[in-house]
Image (tube, rainbow, N blue to C red):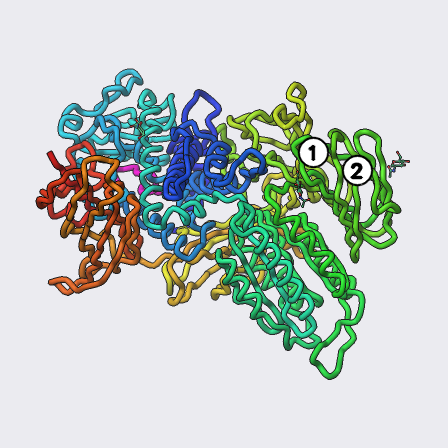
C-alpha cells in the first residue's frame, strides 16, 4: 500500500471512535477486559520470574515466589534480588520502564499498522502473520546479541501484539484449544488444517447473538480461520467469518456478525478471558524461546530487570584533558571496585571519547574490566585550540544508554557541533536521560599540555550556556570547577551510582531571582542530599520540618554538612525524625539550580500518551513535544509500593516562573493513572507527584506524605511533526523512505489557515546516509499542512540487530519553536535459517544406585550429536539447562558433510536429568534431554524421540521427519 494512502487510512481509522481492532491496547475503562498491556505485563512477569528461578536454582538459592498471572512488578523484583531484601532499598523503576516500553510498542501496532491484516491475523492471513512473528523474533534475538536491549524491547512489543491478536481474532479458542499454537513461533512447523480460501466458515448471527455462528463442520474438522475486517468496504469472500463490531463493515454482510474476543462485549466476548489467558501463555512461550536462545542473564537484561544504572562517561580527549581523564578513571575505578558483586554494580559501562575532528567509537560493555581497560587506554592528545565534537559524542551515548540513564560529560572546551543542540534536546526528552557536565577550568585559561604555544582560551559564557541549557532540559547539572578541584566534584557521580536514587525536588531560576522553595521529606528517604549550583555570591537558608535551620554561612550544622567546589554546593542532609515540609530560601540574582535527591523504593515513571483522535477509544505513546494550549495526557505508574495513594500530579514550570497545571487523575489499576492536563500553556514543565504512603512511615499507624519529581523537562510546541515509516525494520544495504507532515496548531488543534516555512533537520544516531528537504513550506490554502520525505540508507555492512533512531525536527522561521518526531528502526537481515539444531542421542551409560544415599559415589554419562544441518547457520552455543554435571564438546563432520557438535555430559547419580540447549547463529533453539534411571543394571536404554513443545490440538499432527527438524527431546522411558 502506498504510504500516502496508509496515512490517509490511518487517519480515518483513528478518527473513528473506539475502532479497536484487537484487544484494547492500553486501557479498559469498561468491564474487566484484559488489554494488550495487561497480557504483555503478566507474561513478562511470569517468564522473568522463571528466569530468576532458574538462576537461583543454579546458584543453590531458594526461590519461593509462586509464579502465576497475579504477580506484581515489586514481587518479581524482590524475588529476583539475590541479596537479602530487607535492608537494601530496591528500585523497580527500570523494570517498570522496560515493561512500559514493551507494552507501548505493542499498543503502537494498532496505530502504525492499523490496516495490516498480517499484524492482526485478520482475513485468514496465518502464513503472513507467522512471518511477521518469525521475523520479529529474529530481530529481537539479533538485537540482544548486539546488546541493543532497547531496540530489542521495541521489536518484542510489536511481535507480542500480533501473537496475542491470534487468540482473539482466530477460532483457535472456539476449536477447544487450551494450549498455545506453537507453530506460530516455530517456522519449521507446518501451519495445518487452515480453512481453504473458498471454504465457508461462518453463518449469520441470530439477533446479534454470535455464540454459534461458526459452521459445525469447521469445528468438527478442526479448521482454523480468522475474521475478516475492513473499515471501508464490506467485501469479503463468500461464507467467511468477520471480525465483528461497529467499525467492521464486512460484519454487516452475510454471514453477519463476527468472532473476535477483543473484550467481554465483543462478538465472542464470553470467550474473552479464555483468549486473553491463552494469549498470556502464548506470550510466555515466545519469551521462553527467546530466553533459551539468549540465556537467562541476557534475557533478564532484555526484560530490563536491573537494580543498577549504567555508568556512562563522555570524555573530551584533547591535549588539556589529561587531569580530567585521570579523575574519570579514578572515580569509575572506585565505583567499580566498591560495587563489584553488589546489586549496585553498574549494569553496563559506556565510554564515548571525543575530540576534534573525531568522536567515538562508543564502547559499551557489561564487563567492568573491559571498561577499565578502555578508560586506561584513553590519552589526551591533539585537539589544539578548536572547539570539540562534544554533542556528537553525547548523541552516541544518549542513543546507546538505556532510558533514564545518567550521563557524565567531561570537557573544558566549547562544542563545535552546537547545531546539534535541538537534536540532543529531543533525545534527552525522549530517553529521559539526565546529562551532567563536568566543565573544568572554564573561567581560566585552557592549559595546553604538550603544546608549545599555550593558547589562552576559556569557555565563553555563551558556550557554557549551551551546556547549562542541556543539563537543565535533562534535570542534570553543569558543574564548573577547576581541574585541581575536579576530584571533589565527582562525588556527584558516586552519589548517582547508589541504588534507588530518586529526585524529591528540583528547580531552576534562570535568570536568577531570590526565591523560597518547599519540599516534602518522607520516611522512606535515605541519604537525602541537596545540590545547589550557582554563583559564588549565592546564599541560602534551609529550614527543616521541625524548624531547625542552617544557613550557607555554616558548612556544618543541625541539618547536616555541605561542601563547596566550583559552582556546586553539595549538602548531605540529616533527616532523622524530620519528615514533613522543608523550606529552602535562595538569595541570588545569578542563575541557579536546586536539586534534592534521596534513596527510596517509592518513585514513579510517566510517559506522554495521546488519545486516538475523537475517540472514546484508546491511547498510544506520544513522542515529541505536546502541543501548546492543548490537552496533554500522561500514563503515570507509581513504583515500589502497593499501598501508595496518589493525591496529585502536577506540571510545574521549569526554569522561569512558578506556574503549575494540575492534572485530573483516573486510576487504571495497580498503581497506574491516566492523568490529563487541560490547556497546557507555552513553556517548560516538570512532572511532580504527591501522595501518601502508609508503609513508608516509621510509625506503622500514621501515613506519610511524599513527593517525587521527574528530571526531564517537558516543553510544549505549537508545531506538530508526525512521521511514519511503512516498516520498522530495514535490511542492510537498503533505503527506507519516511514521509512526514508539519503543521501549525492553535490550542492543540491544527490551524488549517496557517502558512509558513520550517527548517527541517533529520538526524540519525548511526551517521547513516540520509536525505531530507532543508525546509518545508505550508502554502496558504493548503489545509495548514506541509509534507516531506526523509530517506535513510543502511549500509550493506550493518549488522543485523543494529538499532537506528531517526529524529525529524521542524523549526519555525523565527527559530523560537521546534518540535520533532522520533522513529526507532531496527536493521534486520533477511533470515534464511529457520531450522533449529537437532539432537541425536548416541548413548547413555549408567550404573546409578537406586538408593539416593549412595548416589554421590556414582557417575553417569550422556552423549549426543547435535547439528544445524548442512544449510544451517551453525550451532553457536550449547549449554546445560538442567543438570549439574560437566559438559564437554568436540566437533566432527557428519556423513552429509554437516558440522556436528559432539556433546559428552557426565554427572553424579544425584543429578539424574540433563537438558541441553543448542542455539544456532540465527537464534533457532533446539533442546536435547536425557534421564538416567536409578537402577543397578546397565542395559542399553530404549530410546524414543518426541518433539519438544508438540503442537497442540486442532488436528496439527507432526510427521517423524518434521519432528526431527524440530528441537528434540529424548525421553528415556523405563518401565
Ligand atoms: C496457562 O498456563 C497456566 C500455567 O501453565 C495454566 O495453569 C493455565 O491453565 C493456562 N491457561 C489456559 C487458558 O490454558
Ligand atoms: C522568603 O521567605 C522569607 C521569610 O519567610 C520572606 O521574608 C521573603 O520575602 C521570601 N522571599 C520570597 C522571594 O518570597
Ligand atoms: C546511606 O544511608 C545508609 C543508612 O540508611 C548508610 O548506611 C549509608 O552509609 C549511607 N550512604 C551514604 C553514601 O551516605
Q: Nearer the viewer, mark 2 or mark 1?
A: 2
Q: Picture coordinates of residue 25 (x, y %)?
A: 44, 34
Q: Picture coordinates of residue 930 (x, y %)?
A: 20, 44
Q: Is residue 120 magenta?
A: yes
Q: Is residue 155 left or right of residue 964?
A: right
User: Can the viewer see residue 395?
Assistant: yes
- What is the spatial separation of the Cα atoms under label 2 and label 1, in whole angstroms? 17 Å
Count of picture labels: 2
* x 63%, y 28%: residue: 696
* x 74%, y 33%: residue: 576
Between 152 and 733, the one nearer to me in the picture: 152
Q: Residues within 10 Å of mark 2 (few under 14, many from 20)?
A: some
By secondary structure, the bulk of the magenta-drawn segment is best described as loop
Q: Which quarter holds ligand 3?
A: top right
User: Can the viewer see residue 10?
Assistant: no
* x 62%, y 46%: residue: 498
Q: Secondary structure at mark 2?
A: strand
The C terminus: image quadrant: top left
* x 47%, y 52%: residue: 824
Q: Picture coordinates of residue 681 (x, y %)?
A: 70, 39
Q: Is residue 73 magenta?
A: no
**Which residues are the magenta region?**
115-125
Q: Which mark is residue 517?
A: 2
Q: Picture coordinates of residue 227 (x, y %)?
A: 28, 32
Q: Is residue 604 left or right of residue 161?
A: right
Residue under numbered circle 1: 661
Q: Secondary structure at mark 1?
A: strand
**Among the 4 quarters of the image, the one containing residue 276:** top left
Amino acid at each position: 500500500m502506498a504510504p500516502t494512502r496508509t496515512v490517509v487510512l490511518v487517519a480515518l481509522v483513528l478518527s473513528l471512535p473506539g475502532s479497536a481492532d484487537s484487544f484494547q491496547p492500553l486501557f479498559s475503562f469498561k468491564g474487566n477486559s484484559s488489554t494488550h498491556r495487561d497480557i504483555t505485563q503478566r507474561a513478562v512477569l511470569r517468564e522473568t520470574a522463571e528466569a530468576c528461578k532458574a538462576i537461583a536454582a543454579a546458584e543453590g538459592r531458594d526461590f519461593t515466589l509462586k509464579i502465576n498471572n497475579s504477580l506484581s512488578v515489586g514481587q518479581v523484583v524482590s524475588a529476583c534480588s539475590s541479596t537479602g531484601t530487607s535492608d537494601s532499598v530496591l528500585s523497580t523503576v527500570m523494570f517498570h520502564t522496560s515493561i512500559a516500553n514493551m507494552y507501548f510498542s505493542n499498543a503502537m501496532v494498532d496505530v502504525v499498522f492499523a490496516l495490516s491484516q498480517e499484524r492482526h491475523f485478520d482475513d485468514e492471513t496465518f502464513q503472513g502473520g507467522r512471518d511477521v512473528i518469525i521475523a520479529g523474533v529474529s530481530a529481537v534475538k539479533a538485537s540482544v546479541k548486539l546488546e541493543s536491549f532497547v531496540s530489542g524491547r521495541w521489536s518484542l512489543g510489536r511481535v507480542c501484539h500480533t501473537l496475542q491478536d491470534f487468540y482473539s481474532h482466530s477460532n483457535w479458542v472456539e476449536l477447544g484449544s487450551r494450549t498455545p499454537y506453537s507453530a506460530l513461533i516455530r517456522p519449521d512447523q507446518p501451519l495445518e488444517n487452515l480453512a481453504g480460501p473458498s471454504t465457508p466458515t461462518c453463518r449469520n448471527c441470530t439477533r446479534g447473538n454470535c455464540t454459534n455462528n461458526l459452521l459445525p463442520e469447521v469445528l468438527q474438522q478442526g479448521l482454523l480461520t480468522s475474521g475478516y475486517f475492513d473499515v471501508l468496504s464490506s467485501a469479503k469472500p463468500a461464507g467467511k467469518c468477520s471480525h465483528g463490531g461497529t467499525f467492521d463493515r464486512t460484519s454487516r454482510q452475510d454471514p453477519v456478525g463476527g468472532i473476535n474476543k477483543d473484550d467481554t462485549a465483543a462478538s465472542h466476548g464470553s470467550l474473552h478471558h479464555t483468549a486473553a489467558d491463552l494469549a498470556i501463555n502464548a506470550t510466555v512461550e515466545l519469551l521462553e524461546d527467546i530466553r533459551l536462545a539468549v540465556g537467562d542473564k541476557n534475557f533478564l537484561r532484555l526484560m530490563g530487570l536491573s537494580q543498577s544504572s549504567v555508568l556512562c562517561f563522555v570524555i573530551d580527549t584533547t591535549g588539556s584533558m589529561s587531569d580530567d581523564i585521570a579523575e574519570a578513571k579514578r572515580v569509575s575505578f572506585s565505583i567499580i571496585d566498591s560495587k563489584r558483586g553488589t546489586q549496585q554494580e553498574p549494569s553496563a559501562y559506556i565510554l564515548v571519547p571525543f575530540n576534534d575532528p573525531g568522536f567515538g567509537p562508543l564502547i559499551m560493555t557489561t564487563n567492568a574490566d573491559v571498561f577499565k581497560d578502555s578508560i586506561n587506554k584513553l590519552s589526551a592528545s591533539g585537539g589544539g585550540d578548536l572547539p570539540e565534537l562534544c554533542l556528537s559524542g553525547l548523541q552516541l551515548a544518549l542513543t546507546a544508554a538505556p532510558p533514564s540513564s545518567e550521563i557524565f560529560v567531561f570537557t573544558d572546551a566549547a562544542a563545535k557541533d552546537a547545531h546539534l543542540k535541538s537534536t540532543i534536546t529531543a533525545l534527552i526528552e525522549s530517553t529521559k536521560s539526565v546529562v551532567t557536565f563536568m566543565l573544568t577550568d572554564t573561567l581560566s585559561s585552557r592549559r595546553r599540555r604538550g603544546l608549545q604555544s599555550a593558547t589562552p582560551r576559556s569557555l565563553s559564557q555563551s558556550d557554557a550556556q549551551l551546556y547549562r541549557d542541556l543539563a537543565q532540559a535533562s534535570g542534570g547539572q553543569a558543574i564548573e570547577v577547576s581541574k585541581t578541584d575536579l576530584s571533589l566534584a565527582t562525588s556527584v557521580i558516586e552519589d548517582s551510582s547508589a541504588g534507588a536514587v530518586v529526585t524529591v525536588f528540583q528547580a531552576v531560576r534562570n535568570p536568577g531571582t531570590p526565591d523560597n522553595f518547599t519540599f516534602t521529606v518522607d520516611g522512606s528517604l535515605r541519604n537525602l542530599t541537596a545540590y545547589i549550583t550557582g554563583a559564588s555570591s549565592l546564599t541560602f537558608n534551609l529550614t527543616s520540618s521541625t524548624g531547625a535551620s542552617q544557613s550557607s554561612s555554616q558548612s556544618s550544622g543541625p541539618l547536616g554538612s555541605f561542601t563547596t567546589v566550583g559552582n556546586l554546593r553539595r549538602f548531605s542532609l540529616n533527616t532523622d525524625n524530620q519528615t514533613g515540609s522543608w523550606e529552602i530560601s535562595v538569595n541570588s540574582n545569578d542563575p541557579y539550580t536546586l536539586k534534592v535527591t534521596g534513596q527510596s523504593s517509592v518513585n514513579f515513571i510517566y510517559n506522554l500518551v495521546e488519545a486516538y483522535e475523537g475517540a472514546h477509544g484508546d491511547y498510544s505513546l506520544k513522542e515529541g513535544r505536546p502541543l501548546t494550549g492543548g490537552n496533554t495526557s500522561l500514563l503515570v505508574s507509581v513504583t515500589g509500593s502497593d499501598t501508595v495513594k496518589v493525591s496529585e500530579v502536577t506540571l510545574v514550570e521549569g526554569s522561569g516562573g512558578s506556574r503549575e497545571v494540575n492534572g485530573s487523575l483516573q486510576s487504571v489499576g495497580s498503581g497506574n493513572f491516566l492523568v490529563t492536563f487541560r490547556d497546557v500553556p507555552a513553556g517548560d514543565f516538570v512532572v511532580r507527584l504527591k501522595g501518601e504512603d502508609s508503609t513508608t512511615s516509621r510509625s506503622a499507624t500514621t501515613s506519610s506524605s511524599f513527593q517525587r519529581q521527574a528530571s526531564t523537562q517537558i516543553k510544549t510546541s505549537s508545531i506538530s511533526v508526525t512521521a511514519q515509516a511503512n516498516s520498522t525494520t530495514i535490511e542492510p544495504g537498503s533505503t527506507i523512505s519516511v514521509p512526514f507532515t508539519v503543521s501549525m496548531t492553535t490550542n492543540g488543534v491544527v490551524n488549517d489557515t496557517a502558512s509558513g516555512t520550517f527548517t527541517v533537520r533529520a538526524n540519525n544516531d548511526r551517521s547513516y546516509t540520509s536525505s531530507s528537504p532543508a525546509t518545508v513550506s505550508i502554502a496558504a490554502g493548503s489545509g495548514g499542512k506541509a509534507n516531506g520525505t526523509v530517506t535513510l540508507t543502511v549500509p550493506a555492512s550493518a549488522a543485523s540487530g543494529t538499532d537506528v533512531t531517526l529524529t525529524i525536527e521542524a523549526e519555525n522561521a523565527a527559530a523560537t519553536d521546534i518540535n520533532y518526531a522520533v522513529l526507532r528502526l531496527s536493521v534486520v537481515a533477511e533470515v534464511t535459517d529457520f531450522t533449529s539444531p537437532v539432537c541425536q542421542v548416541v548413548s547413555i551409560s549408567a550404573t546409578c544406585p537406586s538408593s539416593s544415599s549412595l548416589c554421590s559415589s556414582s557417575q553417569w554419562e550422556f552423549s549426543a550429536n547435535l547439528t544445524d544441518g548442512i544449510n544451517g547457520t551453525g550451532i553457536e552455543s550449547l549449554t546445560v539447562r538442567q543438570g549439574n554435571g560437566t559438559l564437554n564438546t568436540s566437533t566432527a563432520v557428519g556423513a552429509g558433510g554437516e558440522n556436528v557438535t559432539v556433546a559428552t555430559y557426565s554427572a553424579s547419580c544425584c543429578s539424574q536429568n540433563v537438558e541441553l540447549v543448542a542455539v544456532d547463529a540465527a537464534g533457532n533453539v533446539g533442546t536435547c534431554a536425557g534421564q538416567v534411571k536409578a537402577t543397578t543394571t546397565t542395559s542399553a536404554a530404549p530410546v524414543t524421540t518426541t518433539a519438544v513443545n508438540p503442537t497442540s490440538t486442532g488436528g496439527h499432527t507432526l510427521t517423524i521427519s518434521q519432528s526431527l527438524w524440530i528441537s528434540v527431546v529424548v525421553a528415556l522411558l523405563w518401565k
